[in-house]
Image (cartoon, rainbow, N blue to C red):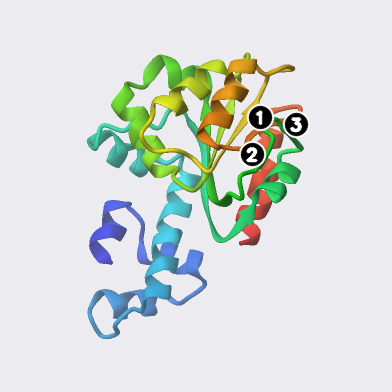
Amino acid sequence: MRKWREMFKVSQVEVSRNMSVSPSVISDYEKGRRTPGSFFIKRFVESLLSIDENRGWTIVKKLAKSMHIHLDSIEDMCEFEEPISVSELIELVRGKLLTTSDFGKIIYGYTVLDSIKTILSLTGNEFYQIMGMTSERALIFTRVSAGRSPMVAVRTSPLKPAAVVLHGPRKVDELAIRLAELEKIPLILSMHRTVRDVIRSLRIICERT
């Protein structure tokens, strides 16, 4: 625990405040006076990530870069403690289901990607790494013009998201819809006015879970 706390450049006081425990509790765990359970470790890791998020993801970005993963294209991401249905996702993003079915998919989290940065800056392997992080999650592409490029990228990836949400276009390319049908991935068009509105709505369920 101490190794990870120091790696994230977080003091005992900072992490204890974030976890709503006393600094002595953190000290006891780090010195081996107590043995942390899985729930405490989960809260500890979430606290480190929360603190790093408030600092602009400085450490996470360094770690990702060391693994050759570029996070500039990722605008937001979250893993739910409890899964949600596609219909709940549609409601959150003020969406319209473009495929004939939601294919019974369950959503365990989401990743919001800037489609332009994704296409311009990521190699195929880097995109596949992100796809691996989004299995059983909703992949949300922002600043989309027609939706064809994101769905072609999803189609060629060996790992698939549970759902794809597009934000930006007034009308989605028919090929994008056909590819989603072939892959049995629910394709959703978000009607939120801005990207910030999309993320804010998703954060509601993220914070609730």
The residue depicted at 64 percent of the width and 48 percent of the height is 203
| Label 2 neighbour load within 10 Å: few <14, some 14-19, many 20+ | some
Mark 1 is on which residue type?
Answer: Val
Q: Which residue is mark 1?
A: 195
Cβ atoms under marks 3 and 1 closer than 8 Å: yes
Q: Is residue 29 left or right of residue 39?
A: left
Res. 172 image quadrant: top right
Relative height, residue 184 to residue 4 (above, below): above
Q: Image quadrant of residue 15?
A: bottom left
Name the kind of residue labelled 3 in the image.
His
- Mark 2–mark 1 contact, CB under 8 Å? yes
Q: In the image, 142: left or right of 51?
A: right
Helix, strand or loop at disc 3? loop
Q: Which residue is mark 3?
A: 192
Residue 155 percent location from the top left of the image: 45, 26
The residue that label 2 is drawn on is 199
Q: Residues within 10 Å of mark 1 (few under 14, many from 20)?
A: some
Give coordinates of residue 105: x percent, y percent.
58, 49
- Where does residue 64 sit, x and y in percent of width and height? 31, 38
Residue 58: % across, % down: 38, 39
What residue sits 47% from the left and 46% below the top? 53
SS label for mark 2: helix
As helix, strand or loop, the secondary structure at mark 1 comes to helix
What distance separates the C-alpha of mark 2 from that of mark 1?
6 Å
From the viewer's perspective, is 88 left or right of 75? right
**Label ID, residue 6:** none
Along the viewing direction, whichever of 108 and 121 lies nearer the viewer: 108
Badge nearest the viewer, 2 or 3:
3
Quadrant for residue 209, please give it: bottom right
Q: Nearer the viewer, residue 7 or 154?
A: 154
Mark 3: give few (<14), some (14-19) or many (20+) Cα within 10 Å.
some
